[in-house]
Image (cartoon, rainbow, N blue to C red):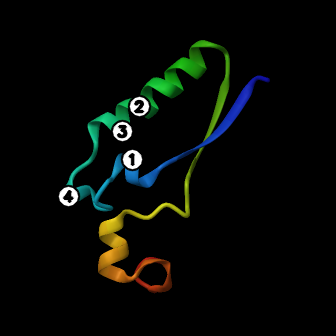
Amino acid sequence: MDALRFSISWTRVLPTGRVSWGVSKDGVQFYNNLINELLENGMKTFVTLFHWDLPQTLEDEYGGFLSPKIV
């Protein structure tokens, strides 16, 4: 195996769903460490955004994926 596809969890990086409300430095560092480790071991990385992951604050504010403001 020489490649790995993985998804970034929106809630791990943006726990509140908005950059203006704060970015999780621990979350960013987690993915930075993961990618660096994969690259150091000769792995190609393919990163996606986990599209069914929604921060609770946005679920509460907009009613989740049923809202046109989310989609």
Q: Residue at x 28, y 43 (%)?
A: 24
Disc 4 is placed on an element classified as: helix
Q: What amino acid does circle 4 point to? A: Trp
| Crowd tier of the residue under label 1, counting other residues whose Cα lies within 10 Å: few below 14, some 14–19, many 20 or above | some
- Cα gap from disc 2 to disc 1, whole angstroms: 9 Å
Give whichever of discs 3 and 1 has the lower sequence position.
1
Return the residue at label 3. 27
- Nearest to the observer: residue 46 or residue 65: 65
Q: Label 3 vs label 1: CA separation?
A: 5 Å
Relative horizontal placement of residue 68, taking residue 50 as reference (left or right): left
Q: Which mark is residue 12?
A: 1
Are circles 2 and 1 on residues that touch, CB within 8 Å?
Answer: yes
- Measured from the top left, where is residue 49 in percent x and y? 54, 53
> Residue 30, which numbered label?
2
Point out the residue furthest to the left here: 21
* Residue type marked 2: Phe
Residue 21 got which mark? 4
Crowding at dot 3, Cα within 10 Å, few <14 / some 14-19 / many 20+, comes out as some
- Element class at badge 3: helix
Disc 2 from disc 3: Cα separation: 5 Å
